[in-house]
Image: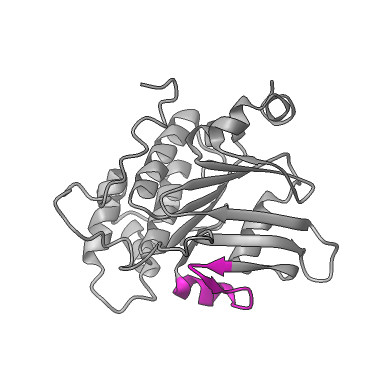
């Protein structure tokens, strides 16, 4: 047993987020998802340079990648370009140089909407739920691109986040911050994404709620879905990370496994408080 409560058992990749482990198919995942070419990460934003509109570049030759079953975490000081890097991968800003590749396909020219269809699930930091709609209506909105029966997926979301089933007929705007984040993640999973992208999912929640959200994120990764996540709680995020990227002024400053970055003296001193 390791000293890290998050990492224990990470090698056991469950096939289902639901309680019925006898199922051979996971409704949350699309069939054939998460099978990258042998020499290419499943999702990579490679050598990205760019910014917002006609403003100055925020990213400078920045590379971020994640593979099936991995949790990749982007950390760094305020203003380092963490969320910008995430948004660049999702197509929310133009990159002047570099490319984005998903499952072997160059998607650099695609809009965010088209990237969702290709299999990207994105949860922004704020304004990520429909507050006037019920919890269940929010989840149903997540299935807008589907033409099949999504009831099995919704059942799995309720298994993953039991509190959402309890409050499924309640307006999402009446929930706590942590519960709202669960709704946002659940709605993204309803699309059956090939990759899940989370922009500061634990922002503004208590340490107990943060631990619970991280536990759920680990459960999602165990189904094989790659997770790319921006986090301000750097130490806690690196504890669950298979891969970590430390950005400084829009550039890759340090890259390694979560354990390697936690053990790096310079990273600890500069970004983790010693």
| Closer to the camera in the image, 113 or 262 | 262
| Closer to the camera in the image, 223 or 77 | 223
Residue 131 visible in this rendered orientation of the protein: no
Q: Quadrant of the C terminus?
A: top right
Residue shown at 40% from the left, 62% from the top? 34
Residue 72 visible in this rendered orientation of the protein: yes
Q: Is residue 131 above or below residue 144?
A: above
Q: Is residue 159 left or right of residue 102?
A: left
Place of residue 176 in the rendered image (x, y in percent of width and height, measured from the top left): 44, 42
Place of residue 166 in the rendered image (x, y in percent of width and height, measured from the top left): 25, 47
Residue shown at 45% from the left, 75% from the top? 117
| Closer to the camera in the image, 176 or 150 | 150
Q: Is residue 153 left or right of residue 185?
A: left
Q: Is residue 267 magenta?
A: no
Displayed quadrant of residue 64: bottom right
Q: Is residue 111 magenta?
A: yes
Region rendered in magenta: 101-118
Displayed quadrant of residue 58: bottom right
Question: How is this picture coloured?
Answer: one colour
Place of residue 21 in the rendered image (x, y in percent of width and height, measured from the top left): 17, 48
Displayed quadrant of residue 6: top left
Q: Which residue is situated farthest in the left direction here?
A: 22
| Closer to the camera in the image, 122 or 35 | 35
Q: Quadrant of the N terminus?
A: top left
Residue shown at 73% from the left, 27% from the top? 266
Residue shown at 72% from the left, 62% from the top? 48
What is the number of callouts on the image?
A: 0
């Amino acid at each position: 047993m390791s000293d890290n409560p998050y990492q224990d058992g990470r090698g056991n990749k469950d096939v289902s987020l639901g309680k019925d482990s006898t199922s051979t198919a996971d409704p949350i995942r699309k069939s054939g998802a998460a099978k990258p070419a042998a020499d290419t990460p499943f999702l990579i934003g490679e050598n990205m340079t760019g910014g917002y509109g006609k403003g100055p570049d925020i990213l400078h030759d920045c590379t971020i990648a994640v593979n099936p079953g991995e949790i990749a975490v982007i950390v760094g000081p305020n203003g380092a370009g963490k969320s910008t890097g995430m948004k660049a991968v999702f197509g929310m800003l133009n990159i002047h140089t570099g490319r984005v590749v998903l499952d072997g396909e160059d998607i650099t020219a695609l809009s965010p909407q088209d990237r969702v269809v290709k299999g990207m699930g994105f949860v922004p930091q704020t304004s990520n739920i429909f507050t006037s709609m019920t919890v269940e209506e929010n989840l149903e909105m997540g299935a807008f691109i589907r033409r099949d029966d999504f009831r099995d997926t919704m059942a799995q979301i309720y298994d993953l986040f039991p509190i959402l089933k309890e409050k499924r007929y309640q307006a999402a705007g009446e929930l706590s911050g942590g519960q709202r984040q669960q709704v946002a993640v659940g709605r993204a999973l309803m699309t059956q994404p090939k990759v899940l992208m989370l922009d500061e999912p634990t922002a503004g929640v208590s340490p107990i709620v943060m631990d619970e959200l991280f536990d759920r994120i680990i459960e999602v990764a165990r189904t094989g879905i790659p997770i790319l996540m921006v986090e301000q709680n750097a130490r806690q995020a690196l504890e669950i990370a298979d891969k970590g990227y430390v950005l400084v002024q829009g550039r890759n400053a340090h890259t390694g496994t979560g354990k390697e970055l936690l053990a790096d003296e310079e990273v600890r001193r500069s970004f983790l408080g010693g």
